Amino acid sequence: MRAQTRNGTGEFVDPRTSSLPAVRAEVFTGPDTAMQLSALDHLGEIAQEQREAQRQAGRHGNHSTRSTRRWWHPARAAERWQRIPLLRSVPLPLAAVLLVQAVASLRLVWSNTAFADEALYLWAGHLDWASWLDGAKISAQISKEALPTYFSGAPVIYPPLGALADSLGGLAGARLLSLAFMLAATCLLYACTRRLFDATAAAFAVALFVGVGSTQFLGAFATYDAMALFLLTLAAWAGLRAAQSTPRGAAAFLALSGAALALADATKYAAVLFNPIVIGITVLALWKVSGRRAVWGTVAQLGAGAVLAGAGLLAGGPAYWAGIAMTTTSRAAGSEPMPGVLYVSGKWVGAVAFLAICGALAIAWSPDWRRRLLGCLLALAVFLAPVEQARIHTLVSLYKHVGYGAWFGCVVAGYALASLARVVPSAKVAAAIRVAFITMVTASVTGFWYSAAHFAVWPDSTQYVRALQPWLAAAQGQVLIDTAPIPEYYLRHANFTLISNSSYFAYDDPQTGKRLTDPPAAYAAAIKDHYFSVISLTDGNAPTVYDPGIIKDIALYGGYQLVSSIPYHTPTDDGRFLTWARTGPGQDQGNGH
C-alpha cells in the first residue's frame, strides 16, 4: 500500500494528488482498495502532466504576452518610471504631456522665417545689448526713446533675453526660449491643478492645455507672450503655495507672486487683464486657511507688485506711459464685427471654454462657497481676451491672447473631465475615464491644425532678404521698407542707414520749409525729391495702408528703377516683394521720419 497522510479533517490524502482540490482520498477498505489505489496513481500522473504543461506554456507560448501585460500595466509602468533618478520627481502623465508639447512646437520652429514681430523684438534686443556693451549712440537713442513709445511691452525685459538666445542659436534659439517658458507654464498648471483638486484632474488639465493651438504656437514664437504667460502662472502658483506654508514662508511666496505679476505686466502690458484672476485665486486660497491671512496676504502681494511696477514706470519715464496708452489702454479700435471676433476665439479655445463651464457647474454642488467662487473665476478667465478684443473690434494678436485665459480655464476643465469617474457607478468608472480621454483628444485635434496653419500666414522671406541685401549695402541715405523689421533683423550687421517704414511718415520739404505731417502728402513729396535711395514694398492682397499710393507716386514722378521682384505665396495671399533703387541724385537734405 502506498504511503498516505492524514489531513486536518482526519482524511487520508495521497501527496501525489494533494494539488487537485476536487480529489480526495477516503479510508479504503474492502476488496475495491486496490482498484481505488490504481485510480489515485492515474490521477497523480494527470496532475503531474498538467503542471508540466503549465510550466512549458509559461516558458514559451505565453511568456511574451504576460511580459507585455506586466510592462504596460499602469502601476508597473509608474514603478519603473520611479526607478529613473532624474525623472523620479516628474509624474509620468506630466512627462508624457511635456513630450507631446515639445514635439508639437518643435515642428513649427524651423517651418518659417521670422514674423515681423519676432524680427522687431529680437532686433530691439540686439540694440539694447549694443547700447549697454558698446555705448552705441544710435542704438541707445532708439532703445531708450523711440521703442518704448510703440512697443506693447517694456523693450528692456524680453527683447534682451530673446536677443541673447538669438546670438547663441539664431532664430531657432529664440523660439526654443519661448518653448522653455511654455513647458514651464505647463508644469505649473499641473502643480496648481493638483494642489486645488487632484492628480487626475491635473493630468487632464495639462493634456487639454497642450492641445490648444495657441499653446503650441506660442511655444515656437519668439515674442514676449510666452514669457509673460509663464510669469502669470508663476504668480498664481506662488499664491496657492502661500496658502499651505508657514507664516514666514507665506510671506516669501506672496512677495514672489506680486513680483512675478508686476514683471508679467511689464513684459506684456496686456497681461494686466488677468491680474484680477491671479489675485482672486490667491485670496480664495488664503481665505480657506483664515480670513486674517487673506487680508494681509493680499496686501503683501499687491504691495510687492506695486513697488516693482512703480519703480519701473518711474525709471521708464513718459515714453513708457505713451507706449502703454497707445498699445493697451487707448488702443485704436478695429473694424471687425463682434460676432466675428467671438467666432474666431471659439475656434481656438471653444472646447476649453465649454469644459471650463462644465467644471464650474460641477463645483457648484460644493458646500464651500470659496470653492464655488474659485470655479467661476477660473472659467471666467477663458472669456476675458475674446470679450476684450470683441469690444475693440480687432483680431490682432487674438490667437496669442486667448492662450492666457486657456491656462486658467484648463484648471477647472481638467476637473470636469476627472469628475466623470466620480458621478458614475463603480462598475462604469473605466468607461467614464475612456469617455473623458476621448473628449480630451477630440478637443485637442484642431489645435494641431490651427497652430500649423497660423505659422504659415506670413511669407518666407529668405529670397527677399537675399535679393535686398546688396542694394541696402550700397544705399546712400534713407531707405523706405514696409516690412522694415525683417531686413533690420536679418541684415543688422550690414552697414546701412536707418529705415523708414510705410505705416507713418512726416517730411520737411527742403524747398518750402513746410513740414508735411499727412502721410500721403509726405510720401509723395519725398519721392518727388528722390529722398529715399531704396524703396521696398509688398504688393499683395493685403497691402499696408499707404503702399498703393507710394507705388503710384513712384510711377508718376520717376527717378527709381525696379531692381528686384520676388514672388511669394501663402495660404491666404499671393504677391511680390518689389524693390526700387534711385537712379539719379536725391535731395538728401530733406528731413523725414
Image: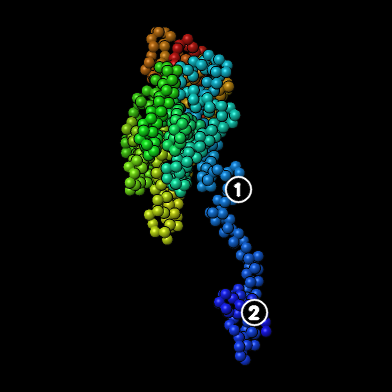
Identified at 67% across, 82% down, the residue is: 2
**Viewer-closest of 365 and 367:** 367
* Mark 2 nearby-residue class (10 Å; few <14, some 14–19, many ≥20): some
Compared with 530, 212 (above or below) is: below
Circle 2 SS class: loop
Circle 1 SS class: loop
Q: In the rendered structure, which amino acid carries the disc numbered 2?
A: Gln
Identified at 34% across, 47% down, the residue is: 366
Identified at 45% across, 12% down, the residue is: 591
What residue would you read off at disc 2?
4
Residue 361, can we see it? no
**Viewer-closest of 559 and 404:** 404
* Mark 1 nearby-residue class (10 Å; few <14, some 14–19, many ≥20): few
Seen in the image, is 151 located left or right of residue 78?
Answer: left
Compared with 471, 257 (above or below) is: below
Residue 222, can we see it? yes
Residue 386, x across and y down, in percent = 36, 36
Q: In the rendered structure, which amino acid carries the disc numbered 1?
A: Arg
- Quarter of the image containing the N terminus? bottom right
What residue would you read off at disc 1?
83
Identified at 54% across, 34% down, the residue is: 176
Residue 487, x across and y down, in percent = 52, 25
